Image (cartoon, rainbow, N blue to C red):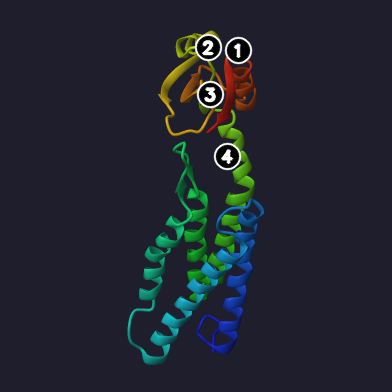
Amino acid sequence: MHIHEVTHLAIVVRILVAIVLGGIIGLERGLKNRPAGLRTYMLVCVGSCLIMLTNQYIYQMYNVGDPVRMGAQVVSGIGFLGAGTIVVTRRNQIKGLTTAAGLWAAAAVGLAVGIGLYEAAILGGATIFLVLSIIHRWDNNMRMHSKVVEAYVELNSKISLGDFMRKIREMDLEIDSIRTEYESTFEEGKHAYIVVLKSKQKRNHDLLFQSLRDIDGVSYVEGL
């Protein structure tokens, strides 16, 4: 039989390929200490592969059913697992979107391997790994030099909010929005704010945050 059909050899090859591709994608996430790492991605990829193998086997052996129906359930169902990796922090930061998208993409790779579409699975797996690793650095660099920056700022009694806003304008920055952070835990006499700043030109965010820390009365600054 052809290797693209469900045979004993095809089953072994497909599961091994799913393990390798899922492991490669998950390794990058694991090294960055993300909620879903090496084992999770392996399981998603292998599980998707097994579901597709089972679907193809039923169709091939009994000549009934739809060879992609079970795979369609994986595409929609994996969203529940991905949603578990997405959290909203106390400061309204959204974390885990990339991990969730990676899990969904890993499931797609597993489905491609499971049906025997090795070329697409290998190319897709390699592309996902490159997006998560190499393009991740480019994306971070782009964000760190954007014209818009969001920061968590704590002010002490030495400076009022109005004085802080004037200092910001003196730095040739525009305050797009500012809101009080009531739920943060900080020392008595301090006030916390979430500030969105706009600059007319690109700036290094690390240097910008340091400039904010140097303002007399600013006790803490953290980029969001």
Q: Quick check: marks 1 and 2 in contact, CB under 8 Å? A: yes
Residue type beneath disc 1: Asp
Name the spot of residue 10 as percent of width and height, x first.
Answer: 57, 83
- Residue sitting farthest toward the front: 188
Q: Quick check: marks 4 and 1 in contact, CB under 8 Å? A: no
Q: Secondary structure at mark 2?
A: loop
Mark linked to residue 139? 4
Name the spot of residue 35 as percent of width and height, x first.
Answer: 55, 55
Q: Secondary structure at mark 4?
A: helix
Label 1 crowd bin: few (<14), some (14–19), many (20+), radius 10 Å: few
Mark linked to residue 216? 1
Mark linked to residue 159? 2
Q: Work out whether mark 2 precedes mark 4 in sequence or the reverse, and give the earlier one.
A: 4
Q: Secondary structure at mark 1?
A: loop
Q: Is residue 188 left or right of residue 61?
A: right
Name the spot of residue 81 as percent of width and height, x first.
Answer: 45, 62
Q: Work out whether mark 4 precedes mark 3 in sequence or the reverse, and give the earlier one.
A: 4
Rendered image quadrant of residue 136: top right
Quadrant where the image shows the N terminus: bottom right
Residue located 63% across and 65% down the image: 23
Rendered image quadrant of residue 138: top right
